[in-house]
Amino acid sequence: MNQMQAFIEKAKKDKELMAKLDTLGASGAEAGKIVALAAEHGFAITAEEYRQAAQTTCPHKKGELKEEDLEAAAGGATKDRWYPDVCNQKTRVEYECVGLLALTWCDHYRREYYGRDRGPNGGECYHVCVKGRYAYEGNGYGDPVL
């Protein structure tokens, strides 16, 4: 397991570290701040490794959580990210729905991964905010199918 993967695994189990990452992510922190936080916890990652992980992490594909997994999860896997001032402006899944590197999903975000067959409009996933902000077919990264 490489250092970036190991750091992500630690964050999934460490509520304090996850909270720090979430704060940095919400503020749009530069990669250097994430790298520094990783170093504080004993992980040697580079800004490029972080950027690559940020570009390739997709919560809708391999390793996705199912409803029963969410219910059985012990701490840190989900978070109530419902902020009316922000969420009422959303028309698609964004950072607020899945967190930094898609590590902390909002309790109100759901998606169905269609698999190889694709959805009726050719999308990979069906994305839904159970608070009613959006429901659409899109790719694995949340981009709507046009």
Image (spheres, rainbow, N blue to C red):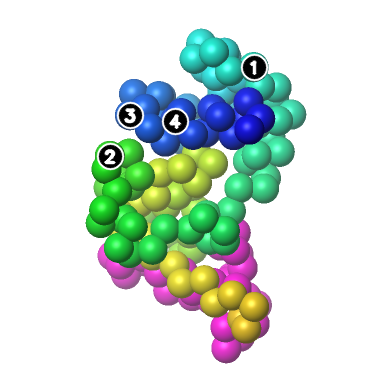
Q: Which residue is mark 3?
A: 15
Report, in whole angstroms, how far the alpha carbon at label 3 lies from the one at label 4. Answer: 7 Å
Is residue 124 on the magenta stretch?
Answer: yes
Q: Secondary structure at mark 1?
A: loop
Percent position (x, y) of residue 98?
Answer: 45, 49
Q: CA distance from mark 1 to mark 2?
A: 26 Å
The answer to whether any part of residue 84 appears in the image is no
Question: In terms of image quadrants, where is residue 110?
Answer: bottom left
Q: Percent from the top left, x then y, of residue 99? A: 45, 43
Residue 68, how many percent across, how many down? 30, 63
How many numbered discs, if any? 4
Check disc 1: other Cα within 10 Å, few if <14, some if 14-19, many if 20+.
Answer: some
Q: Which mark is residue 44?
A: 1
Number of the label disc, if any, that sits on residue 75 = 2
Q: Which residue is pictured at 63% across the width and 41% down the height?
A: 54
Q: Which residue is mark 4?
A: 11
Q: Quadrant of residue 117?
A: bottom right
